[in-house]
């Protein structure tokens, strides 16, 4: 069986008061998943907006990837297949994003 799919990921960045927030959205055609991330400039550091954008976006995509993996694990369990062991580490992004 041969298949070709295209999934679209969009990342929206908003910067306010030294904090950059990112929202990454994955549209698969069957589901929509959203990940969140943020980055804050330390007041003692030089403000380089591009760095905040990169950090917030990468954290949002990491959160999104985790959600996609959890969805795949649930679907594998539903059909009786084994899942990959979960490894937990420090959370990134908004607190509600690491659940």
Image: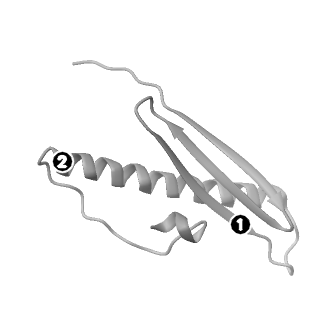
Q: Nearer the viewer, mark 1 or mark 2?
A: 2
Element class at badge 2: helix
Q: Residue at x 46, y 52 (%)?
A: 65
In the figure, is residue 48 to the left or right of 57? Answer: right
C-alpha span from label 1 to label 2 = 36 Å
Read off the residue under disc 1.
39
In the figure, is residue 81 to the left or right of 54? Answer: left
Q: Residue at x 49, y 75 (%)?
A: 90
Q: How many marks?
A: 2
**Direction top: furthest residue:** 2
> Which corner quadrant of the image does residue 40 belong to?
bottom right
Picture quarter with the N terminus = top left
Q: Residues within 10 Å of mark 1 (few under 14, many from 20)?
A: many
Picture quarter with the C terminus = bottom left
Q: Are marks 1 and 2 in contact (CB under 8 Å)?
A: no
Where residue 22 sits in the image (x, y, percent)? 68, 54
Where residue 86 sits in the image (x, y, percent)? 30, 65
**Direction bottom: furthest residue:** 44
Read off the residue under disc 2.
78
Where residue 91 sits in the image (x, y, percent)? 51, 71
Look at the picture and state if 84 lies above or below 47. above
Closer to the camera in the image, 87 or 74: 74
Q: Residue at x 54, y 49 (%)?
A: 34
- Earlier sequence position, callout 1 versus callout 2: 1
Q: Residues within 10 Å of mark 2 (few under 14, many from 20)?
A: few
Element class at badge 1: strand
């Amino acid at each position: 069986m041969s298949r070709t799919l295209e999934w679209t990921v969009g990342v929206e960045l908003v910067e306010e008061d030294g904090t950059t927030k990112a929202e990454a959205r994955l549209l698969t055609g069957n589901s929509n998943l959203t990940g969140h991330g943020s980055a804050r400039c330390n007041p003692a550091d030089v403000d380089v907006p591009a760095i905040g954008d990169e950090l917030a976006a990468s954290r949002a995509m990491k959160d999104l990837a985790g959600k996609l993996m959890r969805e795949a694990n649930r679907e594998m369990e539903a059909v009786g297949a084994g899942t990959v062991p979960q490894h937990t580490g420090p959370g990134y992004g908004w607190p509600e994003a690491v659940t």
